[in-house]
Amino acid sequence: MTRSELLTQLALKHPQLTASDVELAVRQLLDGIAMTLQNKGRVEIRGFGCFVINHRLPRTGRNPKTGVTVKVTAKDVPHFKAGIATRSRVQKLFLLQMKKPSVSPDESRGLNKERP
């Protein structure tokens, strides 16, 4: 989902809000998360997940195109860990998709049909 799709869905769910109000709210939320992470803080949204900063130590890497060895400096990277409720919702959706009857490759080519 893109930011514009999120804005559109929120505006449709809450018609009492103007599009600019929805955009402002989303911008404030995302800016707040970004500022907290910038200050090496942690953002936890109960039932959804948490955003934290992971520190990566310096290491030796390799350019995959040329094979040249390069030094990669230490850096802080944002990380999202899904909460239990979010993980269970995704898992339920995955399991529902797995239960749907699928068509085998032979059936899709018509090889399993009985001939008269």
Image (cartoon, rainbow, N blue to C red):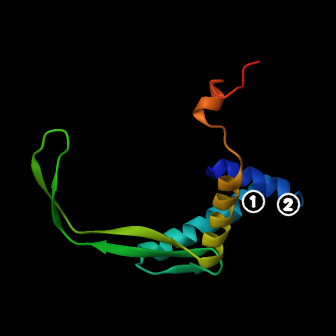
32 left or right, relative to 52: right
Residue at 45% across / 81% down in the picture? 41
The amino acid beneath tag 2 is His
75 left or right, relative to 101: left
Tag 2–tag 1 contact (CB < 8 Å) = yes
14 left or right, relative to 40: right
| Residue receiving disc 2 | 14
Foreground of the two, 80 or 29: 80
Near mark 1 (Cα within 10 A), the count class, few <14, some 14-19 or many ≥20, is some
51 left or right, relative to 57: right
Q: Residue furthest front?
A: 116
| Quadrant containing the C terminus in the rendered view | top right
| Residue receiving disc 1 | 22
Foreground of the two, 68 or 14: 68
Looking at the rendering, which quadrant does residue 106 occupy?
Answer: top right
Mark 2, secondary structure of its residue: loop
